[in-house]
Image (cartoon, grey):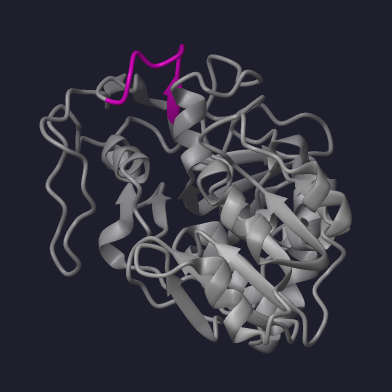
């Protein structure tokens, strides 16, 4: 067993593009014996500097009728790291973490052998073994064909962020051409996905950010440090406001989101910093507003795969664009602790693991 958890001196920061990331002290580059390397977490991590990751030989058990997927690439999400840290109450130990993946079916029903697949799930890597390994076991109903236009890396990066964005917009009533969609926290992965999905549906997309960044799909980006976002949205829409406010941050944007909502609008929440927020009931019912909460951890791999299947035609037609994958944000399993800490540090780029990297 090769321990991957070790103290990380100084602040966590993303690597400089074009430069190779330095190995985290204590990580190992030695290969694991056998052909089935997997990350394992035995118990709740002591903290960010002691994640408790171990790289071992672990081939998942394959129940009758299930599929064995050889993972080509796997996304690293904040929820993956939080589950290791014990912040997800449903997470079991020991297990292999990792929710998002792309790969190929190498064992299972004859009709699925060789199929290139992608997926994610609220159960995968949380309540059962996940994708941060060479092999992943899945029931056949959770096996979905990868878009032909996406590479394995691009497909593995879609997962949780795009599913969260799609489910949120769907539960808000769907996006229709000409609607105004305001995405708050659009510099994050879910925010980026929401902008791209809404733009592909023909909506006018406005983005609120807290750092200067280009946002694909947005016709205007507002820096909340410099402007009143709600006023800027009203000005950009001739006083109409936003029909959908997709709030990726929660409490810090709650008041601004409310102020930007059009009559009959919906605000979507996927996260928060504070549980309690000031709430004006009068403005809420007079505005005929609605709030929608999204938690993709409640979706099984099969349910999540069905959402991805609904997005597949958009990726194959080019209406939806995947994340841009930067080579210095793709790590082998031996450097998983480094990848986890970069995600925990707030990397805006997608971070991936490659079991055969």
Most distant residue in the front direction:
282
Residue 329, horizontal then vertical, whole percent: 31, 58
Q: Residue at x 35, y 62 (%)?
A: 225
Majority secondary structure of the magenta segment? loop
Q: As drawn, is 260 to the left or to the right of 51?
A: right
User: What residue lies at 78% left-to-right and 52% top-to-bottom?
Assistant: 283
Q: Quadrant of residue 42?
A: top left
Query: Residue 58 at what x, y percent from top left?
Result: 49, 26
Taking depth in this image into account, of 15 and 28 the one nearest to the observer is 15
- Residue 287 in the image: x percent, y percent? 84, 59
Where in the figure is residue 83, as x and y percent of width and height?
52, 27
| 213 w.r.t. 237: above or below | above
* Residue 96 falls inside the magenta stretch: no
Taking the spot 47% from the left edge, 58% from the top edge, the residue there is 188
Q: Is residue 343 visible?
A: yes
Query: Is 341 displayed left or right of 100 in the figure?
Result: left
Quarter where residue 158 is shown: bottom right
């Amino acid at each position: 067993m090769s321990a991957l958890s070790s103290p990380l001196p100084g602040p966590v920061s993303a690597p400089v593009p074009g430069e190779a990331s330095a190995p985290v002290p204590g990580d190992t580059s030695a290969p694991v014996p056998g052909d089935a390397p997997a990350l394992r977490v035995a118990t709740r991590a002591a903290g960010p500097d002691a994640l408790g990751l171990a790289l071992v030989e672990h081939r998942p058990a394959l129940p009758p009728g299930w599929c064995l997927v050889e993972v080509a690439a796997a996304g690293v999400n904040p929820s993956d790291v939080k589950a290791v840290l014990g912040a997800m109450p449903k997470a079991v130990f020991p297990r292999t973490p990792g929710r998002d993946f792309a790969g190929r079916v190498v064992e299972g029903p004859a009709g699925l052998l060789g199929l290139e697949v992608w997926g994610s799930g609220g159960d995968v890597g949380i309540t059962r073994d996940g994708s941060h390994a060479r092999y992943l076991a899945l029931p056949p109903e959770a096996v979905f064909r990868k878009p032909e236009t996406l590479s394995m890396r691009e497909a593995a990066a879609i997962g949780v962020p795009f599913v969260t964005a799609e489910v949120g917009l769907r539960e808000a009533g769907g996006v229709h051409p000409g609607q105004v969609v305001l995405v708050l926290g659009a510099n994050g992965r879910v925010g980026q996905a929401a902008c791209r999905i809404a733009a592909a549906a023909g909506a006018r997309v406005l983005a609120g950010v807290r750092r200067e960044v280009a946002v694909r799909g947005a016709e205007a980006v507002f820096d909340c440090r410099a402007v009143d976002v709600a006023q800027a949205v009203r000005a950009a829409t001739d006083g109409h406001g936003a029909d959908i406010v997709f709030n990726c941050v929660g409490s810090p944007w709650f008041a601004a989101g409310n102020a930007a909502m059009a009559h009959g609008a919906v605000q979507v929440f996927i996260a928060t910093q504070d549980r309690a927020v000031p709430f004006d009931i009068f403005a809420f019912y007079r505005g005929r507003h609605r709030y929608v909460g999204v938690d993709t951890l409640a979706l099984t791999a099969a349910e999540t795969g069905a959402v991805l299947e609904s997005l597949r035609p958009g990726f194959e037609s080019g209406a939806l664009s995947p994340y841009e994958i930067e080579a210095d944000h793709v790590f082998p399993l031996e450097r998983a602790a480094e990848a986890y800490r970069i995600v925990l540090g707030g990397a805006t780029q997608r971070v991936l693991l490659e079991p055969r990297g």
